[in-house]
Image (tube, helix red, strand yellow):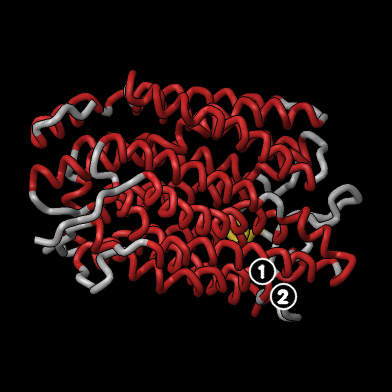
Amino acid sequence: MKQLKPITNKLLWIFAIGQFGWSLLSGVVSNWMVYYYTGSPSAQNPNTGIFASGITQEPIFFKLTLFGLVLAVGRIFDAITDPLIAGWSDRSNYKGGRRIPFMRAMAVPFSLVMVGLFLVPQTASVALNDVALFILLIVFYLFMTMFCTPYNALIAELGDTQQHRINVSTYISFTFIVGQSISFLLPNLASMLEGAVGQKQSIHLAVAIMAALACAAMLLSAFYINERDYIDSKPSETKPFSSLIKTFSNGQFRRFVYSDVIYFFALTLFQTGLAFYETQLMGIEDTWTFVLTATMTAISVCLYPVVNILAKKIGKKMLIIIGFFTYCIVFAITAACGQGLYWGFIVAVTASVPMAILGILPQACVADVAELTRLETGEDRSGMFFAARTFAFKMGQALALVIFTSVTVSQTQASYRATAVIAFVTCLIGALLFFAFNEKMILAKIGELKGTEEV
């Protein structure tokens, strides 16, 4: 048997750089597509809805807009392909491993399609733009799945111990929020470029620059790590559909997913509306979004060591519940906020706490369940566990996108506040459901099967 190299924190950090790449691409799409493709420009924020005239804006079914439906269908398609790609990855036996070959192949096309989303659907034909936007968004989510599903499976496989699982979850959480935070710089970067290339072209160029940065990060992670040197992986024999059924038949995993899908529904409502909350409710210029996000990120990062230590002392479950309830406070503040930049900072500071907790610990919970299943069955289906989780929460995200664009079709302050209220109620339900997850039992069984103390 080949002697495997030890997994080090340096390796885990380099792995986490790949998360920065795909989170930057995802952040640009999730944070700015709705902002640039819907709404109306104003004197304070002239770029709001700058591409809106190119696509259909009127509700086409009850209060459902075309843009909302396109986003929702994209997320549903993304969710459906997750278990298929996970099954493909779990069953593969490529020379470079089960996960890394996917990452190497998809980094460049994934980045290029993101640029196309902001560039292509801007012809003189609204119908053609609608079709182009739909096709490009479907392809974007397909490529994201083909990169992220194998990538996420490596969280469990590189997390060969409880310590490494918490560490890698901490590192990828850091690179994730850095990527998301930099995505909020898009209007700032576009503003710097506007004098040289024009208003719309400056947005296109800013998107392209961020895509190039993201692509470099994903390629670095994919080509630095030689999967076979660290992981003795064997292809799974279970077919994708059967593997998905097995995964959801795990009672503890289902308990985790119930709350996770509701949490992501609430969080997607909030993230989609963040630019609108700041500009429409708080009266803040869109160029301040990066400053506010950077503040939230900086405080959150400072809390990472605390979360890492507390997770080992009091357990991940209790911290996750605290994170849920703190997000409820954030949503409540947003729903009741008034005009002024200070409201943006209140939300940013408060949100930094659950951002730190829920950015780190849920992945570690999934890795724990996947590790226990591997020890009990002898079959490593890590890819499917993470894919099943993303399948579930992306369905929640799809519903959130439909609801947000439908509730806010009137573009009034009351409609934006309503989305924050919905996020508050659903997040509270998610917090209550998570009490059923039995973390102590999972770790005790892992320790028993390994002959070690997994606490």
Image x and y of residue 124, in percent = 76, 80
Q: From the viewer's side, name the closer residue of 273 and 187.
A: 187
**In the image, farthest residue toward the top:** 314
Could you tell whether 225 is left or right of 337 in the image? left
| Amino acid type assigned to the residue bearing label 1 in the image | Ala
Position in image of residue 317 (x %, y %): 34, 26
Which amino acid is tagged 2? Gln
Asked where in the image residue 415 lies, by quadrant, the reply is: top right
The dot on residue 208 is 1
What residue appears at the point 69 percent right and 69 percent down from the top-left corner?
Answer: 55
**Any part of residue 214 in sight:** yes
In the image, residue 364 lies at what x, y percent?
33, 38
Of mark 2 and mark 1, the one earlier in the sequence is 2
Q: Is residue 438 left or right of residue 113?
A: left
Can you say which quadrant of the picture contains the C terminus?
A: top left
* Above or below, comparing residue 316 to residue 235 in the picture: above
Can you give x and y, in whole percent of width and height, for residue 46 in the image? 85, 55
* Secondary element at tag 1: helix
| Crowdedness near tag 1: few (<14), some (14–19) or many (≥20) residues, C-alpha within 10 Å | some
Q: Residue at x 43, y 53 (%)?
A: 14
Which residue is depicted at the point 50% across and 32% down?
Answer: 356
Task: Give me the residue at 38% from left, 48% from top.
Answer: 12
Image quadrant occupied by the N terminus:
bottom left
| Distance Cα–Cα, label 2 vs label 1 | 16 Å
* Mark 2 element type: loop
Q: Nearer the viewer, residue 149 or 45?
A: 149
Q: Which residue is mark 2?
A: 122
Which sits in the foreground, 421 or 10?
10
> Residue 179 got which mark?
none
Instruction: Tally the numbered discs.
Output: 2
The quadrant holding residue 5 is bottom left
Instruction: Give above or below for 262 relative to 237.
Output: above
